[in-house]
Image: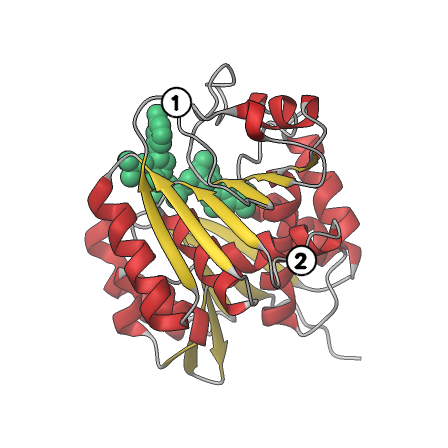
Amino acid sequence: MAKNYRAELVGVFGDPIDENPTGVMEEAAFAALGLAWRYLTVRVRKEQLAGAMAGMRAFGMRGVNLTIPHKVEVLKYLDELSPAAEIIGAVNTVVNRDGRLFGENTDGKGFLKSLRDSGADPKGRSVTVLGAGGAARAICVECALAGARRIHILNVGRARGEELAATVREKTGVETLYSPWQGRAALPQGTEILANATSLGLYPNVHEKPDIDYEAIGPGMAVIDVIFNDPNSLFLQSAKAKGAKTINGLGMLANQGALNFELWTGEKAPLGVMEATLRAEFGL
Ligand code: NDP
């Protein structure tokens, strides 16, 4: 039988990129399924994206992830967007479908899968999101598309918070409110799912947590963190102490990686392998 030394290529373009752990988890998944695929972690500077996207096509790469600073800029090189990516206005995953580039945003979808796997479907629920940056944007849009009853955004920067609330409200029809966040924030009445989508608590700042009224958290509430390199973040510890169900960001990252894997290869992702690889990578 003729040998085939060629690998199918995917990867990530970003800058900075050295500490991005996605490749380790994707390569572990390829190995687990015996696929001759490689995931390349590539530093692409802001002004080099056009060349990188042309190169991606020239290499016949099956897809790429995009991270800082390319998630919005990449839109101009794509042929088609998923409905969620269209509303979010940012893409973290590109799939090369026979030369047509399709853009998806799996940040919020990984979040949603983590919630659902923990029995906390946002459908019909009142969701409070702390933060209004890229992760919060994806999370709010996915929760709205998943049928959340109400979304409440708390953010320190007013303009960013108001703009996100207006976008979600107008594009999805779901009641979406913004509240300013100065000092200790009160939790909006009726919160059933609470998500930290700020960068507070990200390693090495493990002593930080969002300044909110933790006394208002109670049993029956699901509390989820985007921070992935500390599954026992102070935020989650505080929520757990109040009896809430807690869900860490490691699962969100693994789920996001699994969705990318499935979009690219068409195979079912070995989620357990991917999550275990991340844990080992973070020394957990
Ligand atoms: P951005 O920089 O876009 O947004 C950061 C957000 O954090 C903003 O809303 C900002 O508020 C808020 N914030 C920062 N410092 C404070 C503070 N002291 N008090 C209150 N709010 C604060 O970042 P991203 O949205 O891209 O990422 C956020 C986090 O999500 C990161 O830790 C990232 O690693 C994580 N992430 C995890 C994923 C996963 O799969 N687990 C996927 C994607 C991201 P303001 O607007 O006022 O500045």
Q: Amino acid at mark 2?
A: Asp
Quadrant hosting residue 53: bottom left
> Residue 105 at what x, y percent from top left?
46, 63
Examine the rendered structure and indicate whether residue 33 appears above or below residue 229: below
Q: Quadrant of the C terminus?
A: top right
For image coordinates 37% across by 40% down, the residue present is 154
Q: Residue furthest top?
A: 207
- Count every numbered label the image shows and give the total: 2
Q: Could you say which disc has been placed on residue 121 in the image?
A: 2
Find out if the beta carbon at label 2 lies less than 8 Å from the nearest ligand 1 atom. Answer: no
Q: Is residue 62 left or right of residue 268?
A: left
For image coordinates 48% across by 22% down, the residue present is 209
Q: Quadrant of the N terminus?
A: bottom right
The CA span between labels 2 and 1 is 28 Å
For image coordinates 44% across by 69% down, the residue present is 84
Of 21 and 147, the residue lying toward us: 147
Within-10-Å neighbours for mark 1: few <14, some 14–19, many 20+: few
Tag 1 secondary structure: loop
> Residue 85 at what x, y percent from top left?
41, 68
For image coordinates 65% across by 32% down, the residue present is 281
> Residue 256 at what x, y percent from top left?
59, 55
- Residue 191 visible? The answer is yes
Q: Could you say which disc has been placed on residue 184 in the image?
A: 1
Examine the rendered structure and indicate whether residue 78 appears above or below residue 236: below
Q: Amino acid at mark 1?
A: Arg
